[in-house]
Image (tube, rainbow, N blue to C red):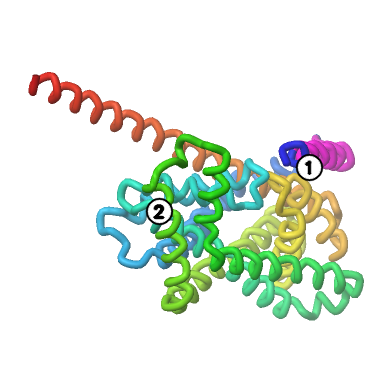
Amino acid sequence: MKRLETLIIVLALAFYIWFLRRFGLAQVLGYVRLVGWGLMLTISLETVSRLFNTLGWRVTIRDCPRELSFLELFAARISGEAVDYVTPSAQLGGQPVMAMMVRRKLPMARGLASVAVAALAESIGQILFISAALLAALPLVWHLHDLFWPVLGGFAVAVGLAYGFYLLQVKQPFALLWRAADKLDLPMMRGDDVRRSADEADALLLDFYAHRRMRLAASCICYFFAWAMGPVEIYILLHLLYEPATVQVALLVEALGLLIERATFMIPAKLVSQEGGKALILAMLGYSADVGFAIGFLRRIKEMAWVMFGLGTLAAHRLITDRAERLLQTEGAFQGAEGD
């Protein structure tokens, strides 16, 4: 499996280098200079999307502890998204990170169940957004007959992944993971407490899908609005690059871009889908491919800024947690010495 992941990363990097040579780094940087401080606007605008993402997760937590603040959920969310971005984990590697970061206030079983449900809601919200965007941009879609089968195929992949993820969640996934880890004889996975947490998380998932469907729907709506911020960014970037921009173009570029990302979900950091995908889509819409590549590159700068925020938050959380644990150990040892 690791060899496959390595091969995927190497091929993606090779494509990315080819893209840079094809479009020219100097020309791409020229577009970046043209946008200038407008890039800060897109980075700031991403905050709105991240807040909706956090709200979508928060909705899935029934009886959320009062001491668990929205800011802590936000910090855990951007940290998990950063891990997803830099690892070939099919955008699922960050979910355990989110649960781990709030485990002191939200029991691990509830945390794991909530992030699993939130991940499914995010996928459904994305499918809803893509459907709405394609319908709104239907006049443009009809003019691009060559896109029909690729769009249909990408949409089928997105729906298939979401449905497969749901089926996995109702088949006791955490117990399955625990049994697999137990066979590997991992010290951290030993003990009845871990097994009970896995069983509890599975039970919480089944209960949620059976009795909390309104919460699932509310979470999907939150993620829908988060995905809807993408076309706003495309529209702004086209204007900053002095290119003609319409709402329909922005919607279609974002929807098709997301379909490409779904089809290449195993590739970390969107190495193929980001710049290459935007160049292909905008070229088919009559724009220069250079403009599409530049928009993808500008979006990558924004994403990397948020990856730095997320990884920095994760590092700070670990430092604070480790320090708190050392203080507790020191206090325990001191009290033990006094007792003697």
User: Label 2 is placed on what type of residue?
Assistant: Ser
Residue shown at 43% from the left, 58% from the top: 199
| Residue 143: percent from left, percent from top | 88, 76
Residue 111 occupies quadrant:
bottom left
Compared with residue 231, is residue 316 higher up or lower down, i.e. above or below? above
Q: Which residues are magenta?
A: 6-25
Report the front residue among 333 and 236.
Answer: 333
Residue of label 1: 8
In the rendered view, does 332 fall on the left or right side of 133? left
Residue furthest left as drawn: 339
Q: Where does the N terminus fall, quadrant-wise?
A: top right
Give 248 or 131, whichever is nearer the viewer. 131
Within 10 Å of the Cα at label 1, are there few (<14), some (14-19), or many (20+) other Cα atoms?
some
Q: Relative to 62, is 51 above or below?
A: above
Q: Which mark is residue 197?
A: 2
Residue 287 shows up from this direction? yes
Q: Nearer the viewer, residue 13 or 211?
A: 211
Residue 119 occupies which quadrant of the picture?
Answer: bottom right
Q: Residues within 10 Å of mark 2 (few under 14, many from 20)?
A: some
Which tag is nearer the camera, tag 1 or tag 2? 2
Q: Secondary structure at mark 2?
A: helix
When the figure is inspected, residue 63 is found, relative to residue 82, above or below; the finding is: below
Q: Is residue 135 left or right of residue 96?
A: right
What amino acid type should be assigned to the residue bearing mark 1? Ile
